[in-house]
Structure formats: C-alpha cells, structure tokens
Image (tube, helix red, strand yellow):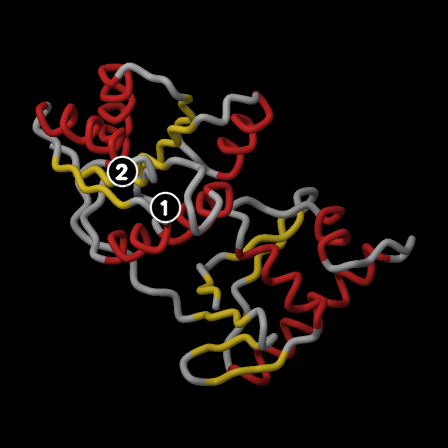
C-alpha cells in the first residue's frame, strides 16, 4: 500500500482518480492547492505525490524543485494538461520522477505509482526542518536565531541556488545576479568568497555551499524561503 497525495484543482477528476487508487488498496488524500499540499507533506508519511502543474496559488514548475529539495525521498509524479515537449523536459530536469499528460488511463497511472513506490519504499519519517532560512524580501540569511544582511546580488545568488536541486552553471548565476560584463565570472567568485566569510563571521558556521568544477554552484543543505 502506498500513501498517495493528489494535488489537483479539478476536484471531480481528483476524486475519480482517488477512488480508483483506493480500490487498489492505496491510501489516498487530496488537496486542491499548493498551500494545503505543503501542510499535508509536513505531516509525514507521504510516499508519492501526483502533482497537477496548474494550481490556483502556485505554479507547479515552482513547486517541483522546492519539493525535491525538502522531500527528496518522496516520489514525484506530474500529471498535467501541459503537453508541450519543452514542458516535459523542464519538469523532469527540475526533479519530477515521471511526467505524464492528461488524459491518462488510471491503470497506467497506477503502474507508474507502483514503480515509484518500489524506488522510494515506505515513508516512516520526515526530514528535519532546515536550520537555514533565506528571507528574500528582507535580504537576510538566518541561522538558529542569528541573522546577517545580504546585498541584492548575494540574496539573488542564494535564492537561485535554493530553488534549484542541481548545480547552477556559472553563466546562469551571472544572469541571475544581474551581471553581464566580461569580468562577471570573476565577480561571481568574489561574491562567493565574501558570502562565505560573512556567514562564518556573522553566523558562526560555514555556508553549505558546494562548488562543482565545470558545473557551477549548489547548496549542500536545504534552505527555507520566506
């Protein structure tokens, strides 16, 4: 039995899907927006999420990398009406395990869920909440009650890494922090150096930042966004 969370704003469709999966002895819950989804995930024990991209309060393409970062052990299956090839590639690159399009026969959906369940296994615990919090609007980085103030480029840099689960290439970082001059690459290295020093001095802990040669930068710990 798999514990499945269906995130779908078409409740009639979600209920039909849930009824079919329940008959296969899965435990199924439904939410129709991202806010309720995050609340349900925080309760733990979800094995597979069936995610529609067209949610009323948050675009699914923004949900995928955050979910993959916060709940890497959960199987993530996108079920959407967005059939364009580029959307499929984007969804998989952001971290979806499967990208399926509507309409779909429910037995096929069930087969994908069973395949995911074999990979992720039983979900007994939820990951510990991140100790790091990036406050984008206030441009602050917090850790265990302490905070440091960030420059606009430092904040943009950390935000870019937070919403991506894979290393972010240097050229993407340059564009994301607003630099386009020929010396922008070196400026990224200087920004990283200053940011590491600022975190160590102001927060008393090394920034969980990983440099991958030829790939760019990534975070080695999850960050909360607020």
Q: Which mark is residue 35?
A: none
Residue lying at 71% horizontally and 54% vertically, measured from the top left = 176
Kindly indicate the quadrant of the structure image that contains residue 24. Answer: top left
Question: Against 207, is 167 above or below?
Answer: above
The CA distance from mark 2 to mark 1 is 17 Å
Left of 106 or right of it: where is 21? left
Of the numbered discs 2 and 1, the one sitting upstream in the chain is 2
Q: Check disc 2: other Cα within 10 Å, few if <14, some if 14-19, many if 20+.
A: many
Residue situated furthest right in the rendering = 182
Left of 67 or right of it: where is 26? left
Residue 200 place in picture, x, y as percent: 57, 79
Question: Against 158, is 101 above or below?
Answer: above
Dots 2, 1 in contact, CB < 8 A: no
Question: Against 126, is 48 above or below?
Answer: above
Secondary structure found at label 2: strand
Secondary structure found at label 1: loop
Residue lying at 46% horizontally and 42% vertically, measured from the top left = 60
- Total label count? 2
Left of 75 or right of it: where is 183? right
Q: Which mark is residue 6?
A: 2
Q: Which mark is residue 72?
A: 1
Q: Check disc 1: other Cα within 10 Å, few if <14, some if 14-19, many if 20+.
A: some
Residue 27 place in picture, x, y as percent: 12, 37
């Amino acid at each position: 039995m798999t514990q499945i969370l269906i995130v779908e704003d078409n409740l009639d469709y979600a209920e039909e899907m849930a009824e079919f999966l329940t008959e296969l002895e899965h435990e199924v819950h439904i939410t129709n927006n991202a806010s309720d989804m995050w609340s349900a995930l925080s309760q733990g024990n979800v094995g597979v999420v069936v995610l529609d991209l067209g949610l009323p309060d948050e675009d699914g393409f923004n949900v995928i990398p955050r979910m993959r970062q916060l709940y890497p052990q959960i199987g993530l299956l996108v079920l959407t009406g967005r059939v364009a090839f580029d959307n499929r590639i984007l969804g998989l690159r952001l971290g979806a395990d499967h990208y399926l399009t509507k309409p779909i026969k429910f037995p096929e959906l069930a087969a994908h869920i069973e395949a995911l369940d074999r990979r992720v296994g039983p979900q007994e615990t939820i990951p510990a909440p991140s100790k790091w919090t990036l406050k984008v609007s206030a441009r602050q980085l917090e850790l265990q009650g302490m905070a440091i103030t960030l420059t606009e480029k430092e904040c943009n840099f950390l935000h870019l890494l937070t919403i991506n689960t894979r290393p972010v290439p240097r050229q993407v970082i340059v564009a994301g922090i607003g630099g386009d001059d020929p010396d922008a690459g070196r400026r990224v290295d200087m920004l990283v150096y200053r940011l590491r020093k600022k975190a160590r001095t102001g927060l008393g802990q090394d920034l969980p930042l990983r440099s991958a040669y030829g790939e760019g930068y990534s975070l080695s710990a999850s960050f909360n966004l607020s």
